Image (cartoon, grey):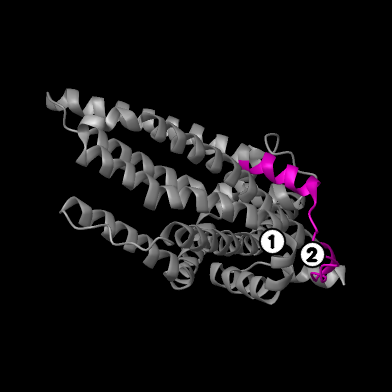
Amino acid sequence: MENSNEEALFRGRSSRSCVRKGCQLYLSNFRRLLKASWIPAVLFAVCYSVIGTIAVIQFPRLNLNAFVNPETAYTLLDDYIAIAIASLLALVLGGIMEIATYSCSFRLLDEHRNTGSIARRPRWIDFDRRWAWRALKGFVSTAIVCTIIYIVLYAICALLGLAVGKMGGQTMVTTSAIIGLTTLLFLVTLPPLFYVLTKYMLDSNQRFWHSLLNNYKSGLHHWGLLFISLVMTVIILLLASIILLLPAIVVALANFQANLGVLFGDPLGMPSYIVPLTAIMMAFAGFVEVILRSGFHFIGYYCYGSIDTQEEEKKKFNQEIQNI
């Protein structure tokens, strides 16, 4: 069984094939994924609900009060501090829970890599702290690398902007243009990191920082495969999100329109249960989002298998050439 799985995973594939196989594996094991990851996914949904409810109800209402009654704006300072602290805590805890949810996906994928299938989960409470810790290290390390890359690219773009300004005798490149160019270049550097993270998670022999450069080079050699796979995945998940999150979108828009109407003198006109309704809709949106985004890793799984296969074939070919 293991050999057949090796042949199925470690085989050269096109980006389209990686996306198709990843979606098939994701959908065919959706219930197993849900059963394995529902605990951190629910906790993430709670944090998402806190941030979403604050964003569409509490924060706009505070701003309205400050705008309508500017003489009492200073009295709202405590409320602003409270929602800022709540948002920050929810953001940090939500990020940890999101990573924990993804660790469940990688655990299932590792099982599929070793056995050729994903077994039914024996119980509803099925969480592996070892995988969660490895995922936390992997995602945090990747975030650190992304931050360093962005800072370096921004510095380079800023220096180029200054050079162009000196040549022209005036400020010709605005800060917005520098940020836009930096972001565009940063997005170009991301696909190889997708491979770096996936390989680190699925290969227990990998050490993130020790193998970062070699793995990034391998991902860079297959930039086209990774880029097209990511773009196709984003489009698919975006369309699925729009359809599944329509209730949450409608509730958010209703709150926005109600608060906008207050600025023009209209009554708020929202039912008394709008806060719990918004919280529930946002929690549902958060749960759906984190489960959907887990699909990224199923596609990355086949990209990883394809890249490793092609790299191994390249090494064998080079060795044969040298022996000749």
Q: Looking at this view, is 198 or 70 the one in front? A: 70
The residue indicated by pointer 1 is: 38
**199 left or right of 193?**
right
In magenta, the rendered stretch is 114-139
Few, some or many residues within 10 Å of mark 1 (<14, 14–19, 20+): some
Relative to 279, say whether 135 is above or below. above
* Secondary structure type for disc 1: helix
Earlier in the chain: of badge 2 and badge 1, it is: 1
Question: Amino acid type of disc 1?
Answer: Trp
Question: Amino acid type of disc 2?
Answer: Trp
* Secondary structure type for disc 2: loop
Q: Residue at x 22, y 53 (%)?
A: 262
The residue indicated by pointer 2 is: 124
**Residue 201: percent from the left, percent from the top?**
71, 49
**169 left or right of 282?**
left
Q: Residue at x 45, y 38 (%)?
A: 83
Q: Residue at x 74, y 39 (%)?
A: 207
Q: Quadrant of residue 304?
A: bottom right
**Residue 190: percent from the left, percent from the top?**
50, 47
